[in-house]
Amino acid sequence: MDSKNYAAKIGTLIQETRQNRGMTQAELAKALSTSQSAINRIEKGGQNISLDMLARISDVLSSQIVSVNQPGSINLKVEGGKPLSGRITAKTSKNAAVALLCASLLNRGTTTLRNVARIEEVNRIIEVLNSVGVKTRWFNGSDLEIIPPAKLKLAEMDVEAAKRTRSIIMFLGPLLHQYRTFEIPFAGGCSLGERTVEPHLDGLRPFGLEVETTTSRYKVSTSSLKPERAIVLSERGDTVTENVLMAAALNDGVTIIRNASPNYMVQDLCFYLEKLGVKIEGIGSTTLTVHGVRDINKNVEYAPAEDPIEVMSFIAAAIVTKSEITIERAPIEFLEIDLKFLENMGFEYELSDEYTALNGRTRLVDITTKISDLKASVDKIHPMPFPGLNIDNLPFFALVAASAKGRTMIHDWVYENRAIYLTELTKLNAKVELVDPHRLYIEGTTKWKPAEIITPPALRPAVVILLAMLAAPGTSILRNVYSINRGYEDLANRLNTLGAQITVIRDITE
């Protein structure tokens, strides 16, 4: 790499890290006893930077800017074995954010989303939206303005960004009423196994959707059909329900959806659609009656509710590190079953009085964890569609089981690969026995030891590994953490506010 390119890449990393800290160039310059113009030159790659200055900048920004390591990756160094304490606020839901971004395609007016999680999954969908002509603008830190064009340039879609997210499949519902033919790439995202898109296609066929599958994309053609009877979903999936909901929103008639998911992200989508003028009966149940409209052109604002999966992450962090922390703004309706499982294993906690999320609908509480002696679950732990134990929260129960006395079975019947990733906990000294691709036994209590691990290419197991490292005395390294950044905003530094010691190490690519 020539020195000019190196300086430019270093400058970009410094700029991104400074902005993530909410720091201006002037504030960074003051902390370094230099001028704002010098910082400006450094960030633009117009000034060579010494190793000493690089170290000082790293100290001020609390982030090791560069390390000699695997090219192109972002890594975490964890000094574990320390209890956590303090308060942390849950951010809004990743899964709601991506659904709302896709649903904004229904609206010819401007959509403003408040308090959106600034995560890689959101970034990928925004890149796709921008590539087809949608204008987006971040302001106030985490608010997002979305302005669609008169006509989308679907032929110019950013295929690489689209391939990196499963959420691209949720373009089908919003687009099928607006375009006779279009194409979208195959869905990507986490490596969790083969999940068929047939439930999506089956749920959308009553609206006239037909799909031809090629080697890399779906070629879609549509006709103006109206569902003649209730649509019964073949699986109670969250994204399947959302796709059919979005199709129903622009069907100017009544659509009944049975076996619908009533999960948190689906409810957020329903609340947003209501703001667009779509009437929906049965929100929170498995039968939705949607009174759609022919056209939507409204300037609306909406704030998605907080993320129950992130809350469960922090509960698991408290359990594995034997800590008392308070997690603020927890959407209790979507955590009650999970907490019941934890109670049965001996987990103790306190709840605040309930209050309401910014969307005016979702019930929130603050959860204070207590140091608890856990025992293995008597029954196997397995997820179910809401209101059962959340599918996305199941991996955190592997961490809980490793912290409990006795032997627990975890049964992940949804994904055939995810349980395999949890065997990485053995590198940190957990006793994990893989029975088959869906089931594993975990025996505690674990005496955690540090390790160096490459991050699994699946979001929740990746976070489980990071949280286990917090409990392991000594230095652990977690390499290439993109999969964590897909679903969590600034997780390492937020855990550091609770007393964790995690250093972010970014690498320069050739």
Image (spheres, grey):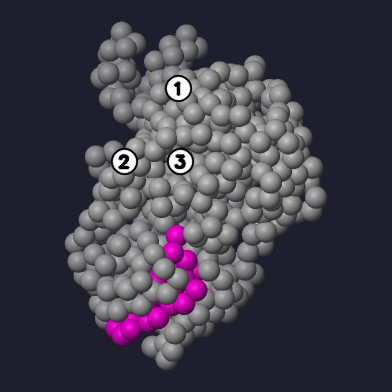
Dot label at residue 311: 3
Dot label at residue 85: 1
Q: Position of residue 502 (x, y in %)?
A: 53, 23
Dot label at residue 206: none
Camera-side residue: 75 or 491? 491
Question: Which quadrant of the figure contains the C terminus?
Answer: top right
How many residues crowd mark 3 within 10 Å: few (<14), some (14–19), many (20+)?
Answer: many
What segment is highlighted magenta in the picture? Answer: 240-263
What residue appears at the point 24 percent right and 64 percent down from the top-left corner? 275
The residue type indicated by label 3 comes to Val
Visible in this render: residue 102?
A: no
Disc 1 or disc 2, which is closer to the eye? 2
Asked if 416 appears above or below 52 in the picture, the reply is below
Camera-side residue: 40 or 419? 419
The residue type indicated by label 1 comes to Ser
Asked if 152 appears above or below 36 in the picture, the reply is below
What residue appears at the point 56 percent right and 29 percent down from the top-left corner? 372
* Residue pointed to by mark 2: 353
Q: Is residue 81 left or right of residue 3?
A: right
Element under disc 1: strand
What residue appears at the point 47 percent right and 66 percent down from the top-left corner? 261
